[in-house]
Amino acid sequence: MTKPWSRFAAPASFYPLAGRLIPVFWVLAAAFILIALYWGFFQTPDQLGGSNAQKDYYRIIFIHVGTAWMSMWLYAVLVAWAAVGLVFKTRLSFMMANAIAPTGAIFTFLALWTGAIWGRPSWGTYWDWDPRLTSELILFFLYIGYIALHSAIDDSRRADRAAALLAIVGLVMVPVIFWSINCPDPNQCAALHQRSGLGKVDGNILFAMLTMTLGLWMYSFATTLMRVRGIILTREAEAAWVQDLVRAQARGS
Amino acid sequence: MFTVFWSVLHRDLLLAMRRRTDVLTTLFFFVIVVSLFPLGVGTERAVLRVLGPGVVWVAALLASMLALERLFAADYEDGTLEQLLLTDQPLVLLTLAKVTAHWLLTGLPLVLIAPLVGMQYHLTDSSVAVMMLSLLLGTPVLSLIGAIGAALTLGLRGGGILLALLILPLYIPVLVYGAGAVTVGAASLGEAQPYLTLLAAFLVAALALAPLACAAALRISIE
Amino acid sequence: MFTVFWSVLHRDLLLAMRRRTDVLTTLFFFVIVVSLFPLGVGTERAVLRVLGPGVVWVAALLASMLALERLFAADYEDGTLEQLLLTDQPLVLLTLAKVTAHWLLTGLPLVLIAPLVGMQYHLTDSSVAVMMLSLLLGTPVLSLIGAIGAALTLGLRGGGILLALLILPLYIPVLVYGAGAVTVGAASLGEAQPYLTLLAAFLVAALALAPLACAAALRISIE
Amino acid sequence: MLQVAKLECRRGDRLLFCGLDFQIEAGTLLHVRGRNGSGKTTLLRTLCGLFTQDSGEVRWKGESIRTLAEDFRRDLLYLGHLNGIKGDLTGVENLRLAATLDGDRVGRDALWAALGRLGLAGFEDLPTRMLSQGQKKRVALARLILSRAPLWVLDEPFTALDLDAVDLLQGLIAGHVAAGGLTVLTTHQAVPLTSGQARHLDLGA
Amino acid sequence: MLQVAKLECRRGDRLLFCGLDFQIEAGTLLHVRGRNGSGKTTLLRTLCGLFTQDSGEVRWKGESIRTLAEDFRRDLLYLGHLNGIKGDLTGVENLRLAATLDGDRVGRDALWAALGRLGLAGFEDLPTRMLSQGQKKRVALARLILSRAPLWVLDEPFTALDLDAVDLLQGLIAGHVAAGGLTVLTTHQAVPLTSGQARHLDLGA
Amino acid sequence: MNIMNIMNKMLEFLSQGGYGGYIWSAYGMTLALLVIETLGLRRDRRAVLARLQRLLRLRNAGDKQ
Ligand code: HEM
Ligand SMILES: Nc1ncnc2c1ncn2[C@@H]1O[C@H](COP(=O)(O)OP(=O)(O)OP(=O)(O)O)[C@@H](O)[C@H]1O
Ligand SMILES: Nc1ncnc2c1ncn2[C@@H]1O[C@H](COP(=O)(O)OP(=O)(O)OP(=O)(O)O)[C@@H](O)[C@H]1O
Ligand SMILES: [Mg+2]
Ligand SMILES: [Mg+2]
């Protein structure tokens, strides 16, 4: 371990750094989410106009979009950490990938849940086999597969690398899967997309949506770091620095 | 180099011949699952004709997946897998040989029995032809992708159902275009051509990439 | 006598809590298989509504069957099964406790998730109610019958697919009346009553007979 | 007490032994010996009723163990090649479960004391899969301390144990025999007895 | 020839050994010793490249075995805890397959001769699942006769063997070392050498 | 501004133009899951620390012997 960046890749130095960052992210998360909620509920109209008028229920959008975006973003980050771990053999990367997965799965579930609840008043059904929804469902399965594989393997080293490989295979397949769902008939693909024009959205709504997403992002930083600290403690139980830390805590309490 | 490919292939086929029932079980599983649906859904011809392609493909997915559980397991348990890993041959080639043998034993029979299933669901002749073609192109992809999952779950508790969880989502593109081809092919074979081309493209890509991933997975699991 | 039933039941539930993902795997397998069909068959509401009951029941059959593979296997491998056989308690009771635990962990979740699936297939509210009822009555029968197969295939190579072959045909009556109930129940709950009565009768018969057969099978397999 | 009459066992198509006759009384240790594959494990499992003989009979207190069924099993404690403990449960949980199934209600202290006596202090509430091979074996052997069964059947109980544990186990067996119990075991080691009678049975050609 | 530098291995979260350094030349036998669970098997598998070390390096003829990959594996013969033979194939079929994968074309007579030398005359064309434990092990060991690999890595090769077979195997190893080969093995027995150098490595606390 | 007025305002806000059930179940599930996750993380951390403390005590006891 001689390269400068690898100093932070060492669990011993990352652990306290994460400990200092966690409260910061909690504060940021709370602030952004509260602002977004205030803006979303009090600074936006009760009704969306347009060809397809939507009443108050459109306020679900603030968490719906936030969780949907975060679910996809977190999967990308997870795969990135997994790939770094496989290539550079840094233990911390695997731990990060591992710590992201539950939060990502929760966001995916929430995107599905809020989307379904939204679908009921606007489409009259909780579920439809719309490509976007189906893709999100598949993403949920990919998260669950990653978590299930990791926890089925007792040896943490093998678990890390096997799950990382699975995540990478998943990433290669994801475009193909999403594409096949979006375009089940290869003869006519272009006509399908119901584009979501972000530009046409009202400024206040957009602000609340983006702030909420930012808040959820900060939240996922906080939970991921908390989880990774737990993993580090478990994995490094034998290391001297962990024992010093535990001893200090024992004296403190 | 190819002697190695052949000798592994030959070994696996020989082993299968010594245990003929293992091959038949996959086939029977496929037939049973396909036959269960008319029992659950009712036997109206119009309905069955719509369901046929999807059901056959889902059943093929499930049969392929169940058989995959044993792809590396036997070799893992008796130690021949680690000996394979220690030969001076590229592991990718050995993996490819094992997957090929597996497909010959579990995928090809499904292709051959497809006309029978087509009859059960009152499919048109051209549908049946497309079904055979699409299975011929699609089942190797299933074996190739599934082999990665099989390698990853080697020797784990609850391997079977875990494997299902890992690889069924990855099977979706094959399912979509395989079943799509059969549905479209009801009228004429030509309609299905873009679907079949896509399946062929998947097969080429899977042939190129899956053995690499699978070999890497084996190296991880063997520790 | 019942302390034993409870302590085995409690042990199996405790073990499942230590391995939470094992329980979730079955559930997700069910959800994945159910979600595959619309991808293969197409997403027209009318078609899905016809298909729904059959798909749900076939998926329940497969999920139950795949989970059964592990029902006795873990206990067999670490030797706790032979210790159970050597206690001074009736083996039938122990078997029943294990099957009960298994159903609570794999059957009951399917019942609870049924409304979700009903949503995916646009089933009517009364269909969903009937589906939950029929699963509640039917899945224990699946676990009970399947346990016999699991006991018989204990420790055999290729156990999973062999088990499928043995017990899927035995599952057919449950499938026919279970799926039938849901289809008929689309209009009103009352229509489905004869079907549900039959399923209840199956359940009573299976409760009376299956543990006996299963205990006998265990004695044979443990030698 | 335990009587074996004209016992014949086969595995596959091979005859392992036939016409086996012996009888052991209270306060006896029976040491079964023989090469690998001579049928020791098979004999012990037949004595427990886990393996069905091809002909002959095993009797306990004068009655066939098939007729006695649960009444025989109440008097029996068998430890085989496998430990019979769950890796996901802790030592205490494993032991409590075993005691409950044996029909005993054992207090928490007794459980911890039994594990402590086997040198597992500090490991009582770790999942047993985190224990070493020898420690797992010790958890299984802790049942010997709690059990009140008169007949112990032990298949190679000394494997995976270190010297201390071997001494301890030999002491337990000697105590059991001295207190009027019966023990049937296979092992390649000698088992010193403080009282009671030691007998040998040699299997195989 | 074979060189180990600052090797560190973990299993799960446990450190097995770290900073392990040694080097062995042609014509040497390295005997790895240690308690159960001290990491002997792990070390041997690391030497073969089956297990990935946490840090440090294994070198063969001066180059890392990771870089050499297939070139290293050509020089290696590993026999582990598992026999690595298929129960459904006969001894001859198993041996022929192993030879083919090693890149050797071995004639039928050589195969039968190798099996005969290991005392398997008459069992060559039975499916190996019908052989006894010791005979299965002998089929696996027959590869030692056919192989031309200079580096043998043997994990407890003497288990399940009877005295004759132990002698035979000791002879094979001594011959290999005398002919300038390298052998790394774990065993609780001594291995007499006719020529060459014997070294010991003790693992674990 | 009397109590009734405030109550009415609150009720009106809660009903969200008649879609309160949808909105609050969406936000409620989100809140529930995030809280559960956070609490779970705290519990996990306590469990890990407790285990490490116990191991430490054991090691100390072992050293004394
Ligand atoms: C159960 C699943 C889902 C349901 C029922 C659902 C429903 C909806 C509905 C009804 C809208 C309003 C669209 C409109 O104005 O017509 C919407 C908007 C949106 N959904 Fe979903 N959705 C679901 C899942 C997802 C997923 C998985 C994503 C992830 C990509 C997503 C991303 C979005 C986005 C970005 C918008 C806002 C786009 C815009 O303003 O046009 N949704 N969703
Ligand atoms: N499940 C089985 N099926 C068929 N034959 C078996 C089975 N188990 C053992 N055998 C055969 O029965 C014979 C006796 O086996 P057994 O396990 O009783 O021997 P043992 O004396 O206990 O040997 P060891 O000292 O190795 O424990 C062996 O020759 C073996 O090949
Ligand atoms: N698959 C595994 N996962 C996690 N830990 C393992 C695994 N295999 C072995 N270990 C642990 O690694 C340590 C070393 O194991 P190894 O098999 O190398 O020991 P050994 O010296 O060969 O023992 P033996 O003399 O019993 O063969 C043991 O303490 C064991 O608990
Ligand atoms: Mg034995
Ligand atoms: Mg070893």
Image: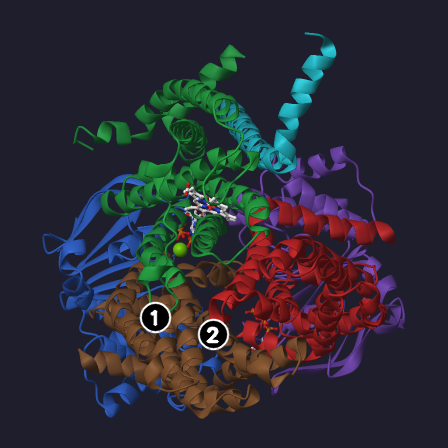
Chain colours: A green, B brown, C red, D purple, E blue, F cyan
Q: Which residue is mark 1?
A: B144
> Which image quadrant for residue D43?
bottom right
* Label 1 neighbour load within 10 Å: few <14, some 14-19, many 20+: many
Is residue B80 visible to us here? yes
Residue at the image position 37 percent from the left and 59 percent from the top:
A192
Tell which quarter ligand 5 is in.
bottom left
Image-based side of D64 in relation to B69, left or right: right
Pick whichever of labels 2 and 1 is earlier in the sequence: 2
State if disc 1 and disc 2 touch (CB < 8 Å).
Answer: no
Image-based side of A158 in relation to F62, left or right: left
Q: Which mark is residue B67?
A: 2
Q: Secondary structure at mark 1?
A: helix
Up-down relation of residue C102 to residue D69 (above or below): above
* Camera-side residue of E86 and A88: A88
Q: Position of residue F12 (x, y in %)?
A: 66, 24
| Quadrant housing the C terminus of chain C | bottom right
Image-based side of C113 in relation to A7, left or right: right
Q: Residue furthest left?
A: E62
Q: Position of residue A250 (x, y in %)?
A: 51, 16
